[in-house]
Structures are given as structure tokens and as C-alpha cells.
Amino acid sequence: MKTKVSILFYAKRAKASANGLIPIYTRITVNGKRIELSSNRFVEPSKWSTEAGKMKGTSEEARLVNSHLNMLKMQIMEAQMELNLKKIPLTTETLKGKILGVEERQRMLVPIFQDHNNKMKELVGKEYAQGTLDRYTTSLRHTVEFLQWKHKISDIELNKIDHAFITDYEFFLRSVRNCANNTTIKYIKNFTKIIKICLDNDWMDKNPFSKYKSKLREVERVYLSEVEIQNIINKDFKTERLSLVRDIFLFSCFTGLAYIDVKNLTKSHISIGIDGEKWIFTHRQKTETASKIPILPLTQMIIDKYENHPESNNQDKLLPILTNQKMNAYLKEIAAVCEIEKELTFHIARHTFATTVTLTNGVPIETVSKMLGHKNIKTTQHYAKILDKKVSEDMQVLRDKFKINDSKNKKTLTS
């Protein structure tokens, strides 16, 4: 967008001096925003031409005042040209600083990014999850590493961030940091938020993302089949730790709750629902959306099993859950023992609830979306696509079966 600058000289009658003279001011407008500067010249009200923006007549006084105003106009135009040549965003602040010889120090990227993260840290548990802060912290670290890798600098002025900067940053994430496509896009998205803050505060005039395009690739979500779930249920584990991890994993399979949401559950989250049965009433930490989940028989059995567990009682938790790292490590052991050829992680339980437990058994997608705490049903629809693939695979088995008798059927129908 081309910057529009206009210059107007006017006499400010409201500030008339004791001897009746009024000061002449310069009004500079940059894209609709105004600044006013004194010209240090005064004039009698009757000698000022509002229409022409200068003194009337050809007297020596008029010639000197008007010459001074023309000189001021030239200085403003020269300041404007110099800012353009230096590629400094033209705003009322930068122009005023240039005219007065007090140029505004350019804002730098890293302090703004760090300030955003500091504010986010104060709101963890209120508006943001710890995981969100961790991602922005990592994003800032990657940004600083990129600045050193590409430009050999520790920080950069905002006005130097352009489209090339963004594409180079993306290349850095994919190559040097070896990030997968979706991880790269998520880091770029974090960086986009910082740029948006700068744009909203008028610290940048041009959006470097205006011509940037990226696309997340659909990741096929792994989930357990009904047979695999049953194998885990039926398996008799000899160690208490594997038995505990199995039970909590199954709890998630039949509630759809993510690890952190299971960890945060207390007995107070269980109440009587609209149908008179027990429900779990909670909020997802990741999105702060409500999740209301009816308790199924297997879920209740697990709750009852650990009702008086010392760790649960001491920490006021519904279940004595281990760290996510330990849970995932032990789940790999469980997968091996149960002969499940999938990389079993705790989050697979949530995918299993969405597919095998609910959608496969005819639970409407709107109901599943609400129980999962999704903000948008499009997120839930991805699981429906997974089931469509399953239908396709099952039908292919049927096609193959019919192919076996194809020649026999042809003979029968044509005879």
C-alpha cells in the first residue's frame, strides 16, 4: 500500500499571544494519522490566508515567513525521501523523529518474541497450557539459531523481515533442524503470531506473510482395533506397574481424555449426568473446551479399582497416573507382550475412543466431537475419514472373495 503524506500550514487562533499574534503550525498527515509541529513563526490574523496556507501579500514580512514555510516543507519532503531510501517504515512517529533529528530506535524481533513468551508464562494454567508455552519457547530458540545461521546476527530489526526471511526460515527448519512438514508449519504459525502483534501495534507497515502459503499434511492417526483392545483387557500382567499403565490406558480408550486431562482428574469431576448416570465433567487443558463424558462400565471398574489407592488419595487424584514419558515407555512393553505391531503411545487411546469405541459403534459424530472437546467438528471428521478407509479395505476383501467365483458365476449366468 502506497503511503499518503500531506502537509498543511495553518494559523492556530486559539493560541493567540498577548499582543494578538497567532502561531503558524505545520500539520503532517501520514495515512490518515496527524502530527502537528510549530513553525516558530507568528502572524496577525488579518494577514493569514487560510485557503493558501501562507501570509497574504508581497511585503518583506510575508516574503520572509512564506520562505520559511517553503523551507520547512522541503525539509519534510527530504525526511520522507530519506526514510524511503533507508527502507524505514514511513509513519507519523518516524517522520517526526527524522524532522526533529531524534530518529526512533528500530524495534527488534527477539525482545518482542521474549516479551510474548513471558506474558504467556504468567497465564499458564489460566489461558494457556504448559505445552503451548514450551512450543513458543522452542520456536524462539529456533528463530535465534536461524538468525545466527543465516545472517550471523543475534537479533534483527522488524523492517528487515520480509518474504525472503520467511522462506529462508522455513528452509532452515526443514533442513538444519530436520523438522517434518507439519512441525515446520506449526513453528511458522507461532512466528506468524509474533508478526501479527507487530502489525497490530503499527511497528511494521508490511506483512511479510502476505504472499506466503503453507499446508499441513494429513497425518494418519493410529488407533487400536476391537480385537487389540480385548487382547490388552484379557492379558494378565505379572507386574503391578504394567497392570496400572494398562488400566489407565484403557480408561483413556473409553473416555477419550488426553494424558494431561486424565492426570488432572479428581473425584469432584464425577457427577450425575442428565440421564441419572455417572458422568465425567471436565475441561480440556489444551483448548479449555468442556468435555462431558458418560462413564461406561469398564471405566467405572477402573475407577473403583483405584478408589483407595494411596497415591490417588494423597494427591487428590482420581487415578495414580505416572509421568507421560514412563507411561509411553511401559506401553511399548505392553504392545510387545500383547503382540500389537503398532507403536503404542498414550495418545493412541484418544484416537481409539474416537474410532473403534464410538464412531464404529454408531455414535453420531456430533456427540463424539462434544465428548472429545473439539472446538470444530472438522477435527472430528478426520476420524470419520479413517473409518471410510476401513470400509474401503473391508469391501476390497469382499471384492477379492467374489473374484474367486467370478468365472463360475459368468458360466452360470450365460448358460
Image (spheres, grey):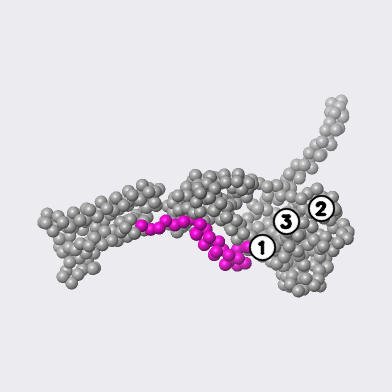
Q: Secondary structure at mark 2?
A: helix
Does 315 appear above or below 322?
below
Q: Is residue 286 magenta?
A: no
- Residue 284 numbered tag: 1
Residue type marked 2? Ala
Q: CA distance from mark 2 to mark 1?
A: 27 Å
Crowd class of label 3 (few under 14; some 14 to 19; many from 20; radius 10 Å)? many
Q: CA distance from mark 2 to mark 3?
A: 14 Å
Tag 1 or tag 3, which sits nearer the N-term?
Answer: 1
In the rendered image, which residue does mark 2 sit on? 335
Picture coordinates of residue 378 (x, y %)?
64, 52
Q: Is any atom of residue 347 visible in this view?
A: yes
Q: Residue at x 81, y 39 (%)?
A: 397
Picture coordinates of residue 323 (x, y %)?
73, 62
Q: Which residues are magenta?
A: 103-130
Picture coordinates of residue 62 (x, y %)?
14, 57
Tag 3 or tag 2, which sits nearer the N-term?
Answer: 2
In the rendered image, which residue does mark 3 sit on? 347
